């Protein structure tokens, strides 16, 4: 079996995780720029992080036969200071030209504030200007439903963005339908507590269908599991789904969305 | 009343098969919840203290949804624990989320 994990933060993971993922059949990953658990003190800190995403991690992944890609942005948790955020945004276009970059992400909202929304709109404009795919982070827990609506409204306000080139991530039962109904792709993040478990992810695609849906681990420095995607494949099999459906959710769908970027490839390519 | 699920998207397993797969796991989760409520009653500041915290109040409200009829219980629980407002807030109060909405004006 082969699979793609389209959202994982390998900067927070060990090399042993790369090995375990490769053994489980992972052939490609994509790593969105995110909040590293602390606020960076300068735009130079972001420059170094973007350099890591575009040079160090691809080399580390390649040792295990995994194709590594990334997304560049300032995440919403560090977007509350608009002056600082705009200094970081000046760095983004340089990195969009790197060979493993797929687009702008993970942009979105965290606490649904006016400043976060302003910086989100500016990053949507950058993606439109450079014809980039967009990967969206939706807020956590009680803030998710409101934030998901605000994010989709902001994207739709930019007429040059095709929703078929936008993945809205971290959907759960209360947000998945509105995301799919508005023409976006939807990602289900498999977390032990705070997002969607493998069992609930299977419930969601049994209820809403398999079109424009994918699963990811979003493995990072918090409670998360870099093998969440193969564990969800196992749950699908346990629940009676055939191999074609399992492959569609964990390989075919992410491959279809990500292949809209000419930079995307798997080690099967 | 929410609409019934699309018959073409029902589970692949029968009720008995689904129970065979997951009954014990969910039995354990129900007991865990019961034990958690008991633990709150045994809080060192007294059995009524938890009710002063919006998280305990909202959890009890969400639990009631489990016994309602109709599909989409998971979605309705998530809705019950969500911020129902629509406008962006003036400034982020911090980075974290609690898992329940404290109401306008905060906890």
Image: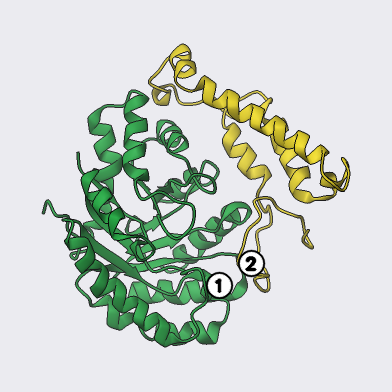
For the question of whether residue A210 can be seen, the reply is no
Report which colour depicts chain B.
yellow
The residue positioned farthest toward the left in the image shown: A269
- Which mark is on residue B88? 2
The residue positioned farthest toward the top in the image shown: B16
Residue A168 at x, y percent in the picture: 43, 55
A90 over A17 or under it: above or below: below
Residue B31 at x, y percent in the picture: 65, 27
Q: Quadrant of residue A198?
A: top left
Quadrant placement of the C terminus of chain A: bottom left
Q: Are the residues under marks 2 and 1 on the same chain?
A: no
Residue displayed at 45% across by 26% down? B6
Question: Mark 2 or mark 1, which is nearer to you?
Answer: 1
Residue A81 at x, y percent in the picture: 57, 81
Residues A216 and A258: in front is A216
Q: What SS does tag 1 mark?
A: helix
Residue displayed at 30% across by 71% down? A53
Q: How is the image coloured?
A: by chain
Q: Is residue A254 left or right of residue A180?
A: left
Residue B46 at x, y percent in the picture: 88, 44
User: Which chain does the numbered disc 2 sit on?
Assistant: B
For the question of whether residue A265 can be seen, the reply is yes
For the residues labelled 2 and 1, say whether their Cβ atoms are less than 8 Å apart.
Answer: yes
Query: Disc 1 designates what residue?
Result: A116
User: Which chain does the numbered disc 1 sit on?
Assistant: A
Residue displayed at 37% across by 25% down? A239
Report which colour depicts chain A.
green
Q: Residues within 10 Å of mark 1 (few under 14, many from 20)?
A: many
Q: Residues within 10 Å of mark 2 (few under 14, many from 20)?
A: some
Residues B26 and A136: in front is B26
B16 over A124 or under it: above or below: above
A227 over A35 or under it: above or below: above
């Amino acid at each position: 079996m082969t699979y793609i994990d389209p959202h994982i933060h390998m900067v927070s993971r060990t090399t042993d995780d790369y090995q375990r993922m490769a053994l489980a059949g992972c052939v490609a990953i994509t790593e969105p720029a995110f909040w590293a658990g602390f606020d960076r003190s300068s735009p130079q800190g972001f420059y170094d992080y973007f350099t890591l995403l575009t040079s160090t991690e691809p080399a580390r992944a390649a040792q295990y036969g995994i194709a590594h890609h990334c997304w560049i942005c300032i995440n919403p948790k560090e977007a509350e200071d608009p002056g600082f955020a705009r200094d970081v945004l000046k760095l983004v276009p340089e990195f969009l030209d790197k060979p493993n970059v797929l687009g702008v992400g993970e942009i979105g909202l965290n606490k649904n504030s006016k400043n976060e929304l302003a910086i989100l709109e500016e990053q949507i404009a950058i993606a439109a200007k450079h014809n980039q795919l967009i990967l969206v982070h939706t807020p956590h827990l009680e803030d998710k439903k409101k934030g998901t609506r605000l994010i989709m409204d902001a994207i739709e306000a930019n007429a040059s963005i095709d929703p078929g080139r936008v993945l809205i991530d971290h959907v759960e039962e209360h947000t998945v339908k509105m995301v799919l109904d508005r023409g976006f792709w939807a990602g289900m993040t498999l977390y032990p507590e705070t997002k969607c478990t493998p069992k609930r992810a299977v419930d969601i695609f049994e209820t809403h269908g398999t079109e424009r849906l994918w699963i990811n681990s979003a493995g990072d420095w918090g409670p998360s599991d870099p093998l969440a995607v193969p564990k969800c494949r196992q749950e699908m099999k346990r629940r009676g789904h055939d191999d074609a459906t399992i492959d569609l959710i964990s390989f075919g769908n992410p491959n279809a969305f990500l292949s809209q970027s000419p930079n995307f490839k798997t080690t099967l390519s | 009343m929410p609409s019934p699920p699309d018959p073409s998207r029902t589970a692949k397993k029968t009720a008995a098969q689904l129970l065979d797969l997951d009954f014990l796991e969910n039995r354990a989760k129900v007991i865990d919840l019961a034990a958690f409520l008991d633990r709150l009653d045994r809080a060192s500041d007294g059995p009524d203290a938890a009710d002063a915290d919006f998280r305990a109040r909202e959890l009890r409200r969400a639990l009631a949804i489990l016994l309602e009829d109709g599909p989409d219980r998971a979605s309705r629980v998530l809705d019950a624990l969500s911020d129902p407002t629509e406008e962006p807030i003036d400034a982020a109060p911090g980075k974290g989320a609690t898992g329940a909405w404290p109401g306008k004006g905060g906890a």
